[in-house]
């Protein structure tokens, strides 16, 4: 076991840090620490401009292979980039769905034509993506999608009909990757296709959903004879599930250390407040603060284990617990923030419903244990895949 | 960054596992734990001669294997899994660590080879006042013409009734906290030392009470500078906490494994109880505890290694040890407690092993500070601007 980074990697860290220090200034001062879950709807134009700035410096998609414009950065370097980015107060990445989900999927499963058509826009920070999986009747049971895709021989295009829901950032996106049923007779994960669909067309309607926070970061998306080209299906009709599941495996957790830096920033804000308002003297709160600290440190060590192993594709138990672990930890942090604020936790910044950062975090953390596989679904997966217990009966 | 075991470390772990699976069976544990010494002397001799475990992190110049703390932790984890009854923890994780941290070259050259040759050792520091840091030291020392005289009592001394060699902490009369503390090494049969075995709820770990009445030791018994050993004692205790956490992680994992094995066999309502979601989710939570505890442990092991060898992370020892000890204590208790519940009635019998883990979880939780003790220690560092004491 070795905890330190190589000298070369430390030099890379230096490079990232100094670029950020030199560029996250001036017109970009305002986006510092903004965006991300709970603040995703804020300063959108400025953050899109920041994505283009990142591209100028060669800092988008660094984990992609060089042939597609990335840096072929090692896992360590990606970790370092994410850490330094969060440390510098880099804003929530509007481009993250394209960079970490759509792009890698297209690189792994897409055709040359798709690569040429879609990768450059993601790389340049000019085209943004959203994820069209969930539907009113397909939540945890994702394979139950009802949206249909039919190939229209006359126009030579796929025609898509149906509804997606909870689609984050759909209102800011140029494209959506959609799973839809290509075989109308099929059920479950068979007979699905994976489509790359332009949002700016008459057949697509986006309706924002107001969240618990009073803001809208996710949407309903309606497809009424929406179209995409014959060449816009990734893989063959019927292979959509395989492509969608492959996508979940891409990330291997490189962004987790950056996410943890954001958590650390939130935690530091709580500590600062506790020292100021006297909560630090309350024995019960002291212990919960220490517990949160322990939890966050272990989250980091756990990610380091995840990133060090599993290159051989082996099942990693530390990776399997990760979502359940961080989501539960973060949810507790939200509650802790409110309890440290005490009576002031109720008082808003302004009418009609302007939350301060910790209030917004508190409410938003309620979604952490739901999206991307709920805590219950995570436990099912752990019990079945890691512990070999019987699978859930299906209706 | 390679935060995973090397092939060599994996080999050490697997060898330990294979040996323990053979010698530390449920029957062997149950036979050893009801004796006063708490271990089988012949087996311990075999460990010392064939496996050479007592020498694992003793430097080669003193006849040891010269391996690091990560290797030690990998072995301890397996000992925890198999509830290994032996003087390993007291001798290696208290005695050897104390000598490595505090002894001068001459003292190391005298005592470490004795341990390599099979002598056992332990550390005595705490009185009955409930603390787990240097403030729990109440025994005193005073200087004489040719050495020191020690007076006072120690409680909760691991294997204190059976160890050959004692390393003890004592303070200058009137001193407080970390101030005025000295460490001494002496044979356990020194005149004026009386020792009493304390029967314990967890029978797999033995504890004793020691009384020192006018115990005279030569000047050469003093480890380090007189009255200056407070920080060294803290370091020794933190190293021991990491070792305990390793035992706990092993037990946490084993409690999960034997529970899941049972769940897959036992049928109720016409199907195996492992198929019930309430049961599956509990098992998933147990796995989360085991894995998170393991992450905390391995990090602490790397830090402990740097603390002994000198490295950039050395000053993180107290924090890493507290994080590991706090988390792993609760994880072990959680898994052993859930284990009993999921076993049902048989979990409450003495026949099934889950009760042994449940008891060991509690004794290791308390020893060297439970989770709230460590949380308060971290809270002082985070909130009061103090460095961890
Ligand atoms: C903030 C946010 C952003 C999102 N962004 C996107 C996005 O961009 N794109 C997208 O496609 N989706 C997105 N989602 C949707 C998200 O993935 C789903 O909400 C999630 O998968 C759960 O589905 P559901 O809401 O239909 O809940 P349901 O599946 O109806 O679950 C309701 C409850 O039942 C439990 N449950 C369900 N099945 C089981 C079972 N087998 N065993 C035990 N318990 C069970 C669940 O744990 C939950 O507690 C987002 C959601 C949120 C909250």
Image (cartoon, coloured by chain):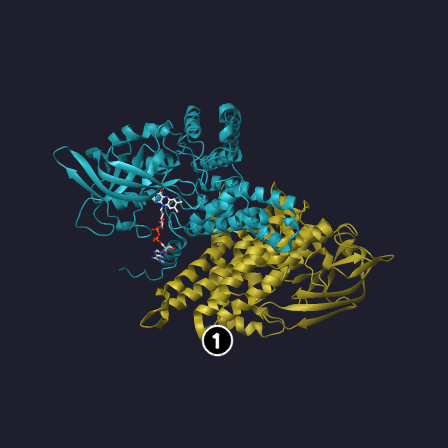
- Find residue A175 and report its horizontal and vertical position in percent: 30, 34
Q: Is residue A227 visible?
A: yes
Q: Nearer the viewer, residue B297 or B226?
A: B297
How many residues crowd mark 1 within 10 Å: few (<14), some (14–19), many (20+)?
few
Of residue A69 and residue A347, the one placed in the foreground of this image is A347
* A382 with respect to B242 (left or right): left
Q: Is residue B326 above or below residue A244?
A: below
Which residue is rendered at x = 24% and y = 30% of the image? A113
The image quadrant of residue A251 is top left
In the image, the chain rendered in cyan is A
Residue furthest toward the left? A154
Q: Which chain is yellow?
A: B
Query: What chain does mark 1 sit on?
Result: B
Is residue A3 in sight in this rendering?
A: no
x and y, in percent, of residue A79 in the image: 47, 37
Count of numbered labels shown in the rendering: 1
Vertical relation: A78 (above or below) A386: above
Nearest the viewer among A23 and B329 is A23
- x and y percent of residue B295 in the render? 51, 51
Residue at horizontal 62 percent and vertical 44 percent from the top: B314
Q: Which residue is mark 1?
A: B351
| Residue A158 versus residue A183 in the image, above or below | above
Q: Secondary structure at mark 1?
A: loop
- The x and y percentages for residue A25 are 52, 25
View extreme (front): residue? A351
**Disc 1 CB within 8 Å of nearest ligand 1 atom:** no
């Amino acid at each position: 076991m070795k905890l330190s980074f190589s000298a070369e990697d430390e030099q890379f860290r230096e490079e990232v840090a100094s670029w950020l220090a030199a560029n996250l200034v001036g017109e970009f001062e305002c986006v510092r620490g903004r965006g991300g879950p709970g603040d995703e709807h804020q300063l959108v134009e400025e953050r899109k401009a920041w994505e283009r700035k990142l591209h100028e410096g060669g800092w988008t998609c660094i984990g992609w292979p060089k042939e597609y414009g990335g840096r072929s950065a090692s896992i360590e370097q990606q970790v370092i980039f994410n850490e330094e980015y969060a440390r510098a107060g880099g804003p929530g990445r509007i481009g993250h769905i394209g960079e970490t989900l759509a792009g890698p999927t297209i690189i792994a499963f897409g055709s040359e034509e798709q690569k040429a058509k879609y990768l450059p826009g993601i790389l340049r920070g000019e085209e943004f993506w959203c994820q069209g999986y969930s539907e009113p009747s397909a939540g945890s049971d994702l394979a139950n999608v009802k949206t249909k895709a039919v190939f229209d021989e006359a126009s030579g295009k796929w025609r898509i009909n149906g509804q997606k829901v909870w689609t984050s950032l759909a209102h800011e996106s140029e494209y959506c990757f959609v799973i839809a049923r290509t075989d109308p007779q099929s059920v479950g994960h068979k007979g699905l296709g994976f489509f790359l669909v332009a949002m700016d067309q008459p057949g697509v309607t986006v309706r924002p959903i107001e969240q618990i926070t009073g803001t809208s970061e996710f949407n309903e998306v309606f497809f009424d004879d929406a179209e995409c080209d014959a060449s816009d299906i990734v893989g063959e009709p019927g292979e959509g599930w395989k492509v969608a599941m492959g996508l979940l495996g891409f990330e291997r957790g490189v962004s987790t250390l950056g996410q943890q830096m954001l958590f650390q920033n939130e935690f530091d804000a709580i500590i600062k407040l506790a020292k100021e308002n006297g909560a630090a003297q309350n024995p019960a709160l002291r212990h919960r603060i220490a517990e949160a600290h322990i939890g966050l440190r272990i989250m980091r060590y756990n990610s380091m284990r995840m990133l060090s192993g599993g290159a051989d594709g082996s099942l990693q138990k530390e990776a399997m617990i990760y979502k359940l672990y961080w989501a539960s930890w973060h949810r507790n942090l939200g509650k802790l923030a409110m309890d440290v604020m005490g009576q002031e936790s109720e008082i808003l910044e302004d009418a009609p419903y302007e939350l301060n950062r910790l209030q917004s975090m508190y409410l938003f953390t309620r979604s952490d244990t739901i999206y991307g596989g709920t805590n219950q679904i995570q436990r099912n997966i752990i019990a079945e895949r890691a512990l070999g217990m019987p699978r859930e009966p299906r209706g | 960054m390679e935060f995973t075991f090397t092939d060599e470390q994996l080999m050490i772990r697997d060898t330990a596992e294979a040996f323990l699976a053979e010698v530390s069976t449920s029957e062997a544990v149950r036979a050893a734990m009801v004796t006063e010494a708490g271990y089988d002397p012949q087996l311990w001799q075999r460990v010392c001669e064939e496996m050479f475990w007592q020498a694992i992190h003793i430097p080669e110049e003193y006849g040891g294997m010269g391996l690091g703390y990560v290797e030690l932790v990998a072995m301890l984890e397996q000992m925890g899994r198999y509830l290994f009854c032996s003087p390993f923890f007291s001798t290696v994780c208290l005695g050897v660590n104390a000598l490595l941290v505090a002894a001068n070259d001459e003292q190391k050259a005298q005592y470490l080879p004795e341990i390599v040759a099979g002598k056992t050792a332990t550390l005595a520091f705490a009185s009955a006042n409930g603390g787990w840091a240097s403030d729990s030291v109440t025994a005193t020392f005073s200087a004489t013409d040719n050495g020191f005289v020690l007076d006072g009592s120690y409680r909760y001394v691991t294997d204190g009734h059976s160890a050959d060699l004692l390393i003890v902490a004592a303070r200058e009369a009137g001193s407080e906290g970390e101030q005025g503390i000295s460490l001494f090494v002496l044979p356990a049969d020194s005149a004026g030392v009386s020792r009493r075995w304390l029967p314990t709820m967890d029978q797999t770990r033995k504890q004793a009470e020691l009384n020192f009445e006018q115990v005279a030791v030569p000047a050469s018994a003093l480890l380090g500078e007189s009255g200056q050993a407070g920080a060294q004692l803290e370091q020794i205790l933190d190293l021991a906490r990491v070792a305990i956490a390793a035992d706990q992680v092993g037990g946490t994992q084993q409690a999960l494994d034997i529970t899941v094995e049972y769940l897959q066999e036992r049928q109720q309502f016409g199907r195996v109880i492992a198929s019930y979601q309430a049961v599956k989710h509990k098992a998933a939570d147990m796995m989360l505890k085991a894995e998170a505890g393991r992450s905390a442990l391995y990090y602490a092991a790397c830090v402990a290694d740097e603390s002994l060898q000198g490295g950039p992370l050395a000053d993180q020892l107290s924090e890493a040890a507290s994080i590991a000890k706090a988390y792993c204590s609760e994880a072990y208790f959680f898994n052993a407690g859930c284990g009993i519940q999921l076993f049902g009635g048989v979990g409450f019998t003495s026949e099934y092993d889950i009760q042994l883990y449940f008891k060991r979880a509690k004794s290791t939780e308390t020893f060297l500070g439970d989770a709230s003790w460590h949380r308060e220690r971290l809270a002082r560092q985070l909130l009061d601007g103090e460095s961890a004491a």
